[in-house]
Image (tube, grey):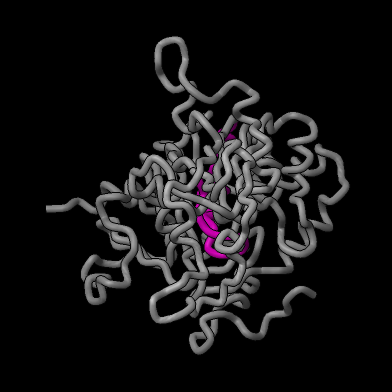
Amino acid sequence: MFNFHEKVMSAEEAVKRYITPGTHIAFGGFNILRRPMAIGREIVRQGIGDLFVTMNGGSAIEEMLAGAGLIKWLETTYIGLESNMPVAYAIRRAVERGEIELIEDYSNWSFALRTVAGKYGLPFMPCLGDLGSDLLAYDSFGKAGLRGRDEHGEWIHPGIPPKKFEVIDDPFEGWGLRPRRFRSGEDTCSNITNLYRTNKDWPTAYTGKPGVKVALMPPVLPEVCVLHAQRAAYDGTVRMEGLVGPDIDQSLCGRILIVECERICSPEELREKPELNQIPAHAVHAIVEQPFGGYPTAVPNYYDYDYSWFTDYINAVNHQSDAVVKQFWQDHVASTKNDWDYLFQTIGIDKLFALRADPHYHYNPNLERFD
């Protein structure tokens, strides 16, 4: 018989068991949606540093970890804090002073493709979106000598691919690009950007040969993935609601998966509609039940994001000294005992309840946004 105690644990236990200095960790969620803040806050409480953090879109967790001085390397897409802070301040300062030693950039799309490759165990995924951009011109990990194999034939770092990307000539000569010609007429797709079809002078960039170019993106392979979901069964089955972004793929890329959730339920509850479940039980190593664990980000059908938290944070740290930033995170998170203490004492139950979603809308329509 399955022992549910094997996977269900506190955030403190999950972090102690699976996250150590230097861990390569990928946090789920997107921007201000369903980010696993409870595990992030517990990492701050335990002071686990030298982290290699991988993320796709938004930086609430990463800003916190950078503010606490815990990130060594950062692999990322967008590092803003929504509207008021285009570049998250603690991250920027940590990069400027060298505390974050390396930062590697991908687009949201190429990063998402990397998670698909990681999920399915593929060597790469094809990408056109990054071609012609500076994202392919800069290679921080390569410049630091972290790509490829060492003298013993082992990967220098198991989470860093031997190349950031590889551009090849499309062996199918652009046959699959849209818009397409069919026997019955033109493609009904709204895409009208395929100039390869009529252009006589095909580009020679990257490969030196004329033709259609394709960038091959390597998989994302973190040691630990962390996800925030609305519900998880005590056997490990996970159901997310609302926009999922790259979470399903990314969650299945790594060796260890930690799931924090609003509510733990029985497997039978999720089996009533199994087609709505996204993560299988056997893929999950730890389940942490923490209501409001995604605060200040939104968890659809449960609570909305707290935009006032972001504006208050920006007002507190923007253009301040590094000492002020670190003290903010010490007072705001590190000094709390656990997330219940943080939520009740630092934030307050009235604030949390005011964010609760209206079941009719799945979010809170009465909040002041971008004020």
Residue at the extreme top of the image, as rendered: 151
- Reply yes or no: does residue 283 show up in magenta: no
Q: Position of residue 360 (x, y in %)?
A: 50, 89
- Reply yes or no: does residue 31 show up in magenta: yes
98 or 136: which is nearer to us?
Answer: 136
From the viewer's perspective, is residue 268 above or below residue 293?
A: below
Task: Classify the position of the C terminus by image quarter.
Answer: bottom right
Q: Position of residue 49 (x, y in %)?
A: 59, 32
Residue positioned 66% across, 37% down in the render:
103
77 or 307: which is nearer to us?
Answer: 77
Side (left or right) of 192 relative to 242: right
340 or 112: which is nearer to us?
Answer: 112
Q: Position of residue 271 (x, y in %)?
A: 22, 71
Q: Position of residue 239 (x, y in %)?
A: 36, 66
Q: Within the image, what quadrant is residue 369 found in?
A: bottom right
Residue positioned 82% across, 50% down in the render:
317
The stretch of residues the image draws in magenta is 26-49
Say how many tags the image has.
Answer: 0
Residue at the extreme left of the image, as rendered: 1
Q: Within the image, what quadrant is residue 69 found in?
A: top right
Residue positioned 26% across, 76% down in the render:
273
Q: Is residue 177 visible?
A: yes
Residue at the extreme bottom of the image, as rendered: 360
Residue positioned 87% across, 45% down in the render:
320
162 or 324: which is nearer to us?
Answer: 162
Side (left or right) of 261 relative to 313: left
From the viewer's perspective, is residue 127 above or below residue 293?
A: above
Q: Is residue 344 visible?
A: no
